[in-house]
Image (cartoon, helix red, strand yellow):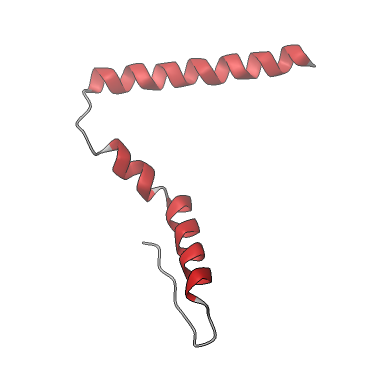
Amino acid sequence: MPGVYLEESDNFDVALRRFKKQVEKSGILSELKKRQHFEKPSVMRKKKKAAARKRLLKKMRKINMM
């Protein structure tokens, strides 16, 4: 769980920025967005397969550019 400890000399804005960075790095918000609505297992598989295909095509384009 992300957390930021403040010292007396720390600025609130700096602490907030550090906290946001920790939350983003831990993936809490993306997990929350995924779980906001129920998604059927078949839809999850389709999305996963589409993402894999997209990554593969991107890799192929990168190789062809060289």
Would residue 21 be found to the left or right of residue 31 on screen?
A: right
Residue in front for this viewpoint, 8 or 43: 8
Q: Residue furthest top?
A: 64
Left/right placement of residue 6 relative to residue 58 reads left
Tell me the residue at 43%/16% (across/down).
Answer: 50
Residue at 41% x, 47% y is 27
Q: Position of residue 41 (x, y in %)?
A: 24, 22
Which residue: 57% across, 17% down?
56
Residue 64 falls in which quadrant of the image? Answer: top right
View extreme (right): residue: 66
Looking at the image, residue 45 sits to the left or right of residue 64; the answer is left
Q: Work out whether 18 lies above or below 30.
A: below
- Residue drawn at 42 percent across, 56 percent down: 23
Q: Is residue 16 above or below residue 62?
A: below
Q: How many marks?
A: 0
* Residue 24 location (% of width, % of height): 45, 51
Q: Can you tell which quarter of the image residue 62 is in? A: top right
Please determine whether, in this image, residue 8 is positioned above or below residue 35: below
Q: Quadrant of the C terminus?
A: top right
Q: Name the spot of residue 44 as percent of width and height, x first.
A: 30, 23
Which residue is farthest bottom?
Answer: 8
Relative height, residue 10 to residue 40 (above, below): below
Q: Position of residue 14 (x, y in %)?
A: 53, 70
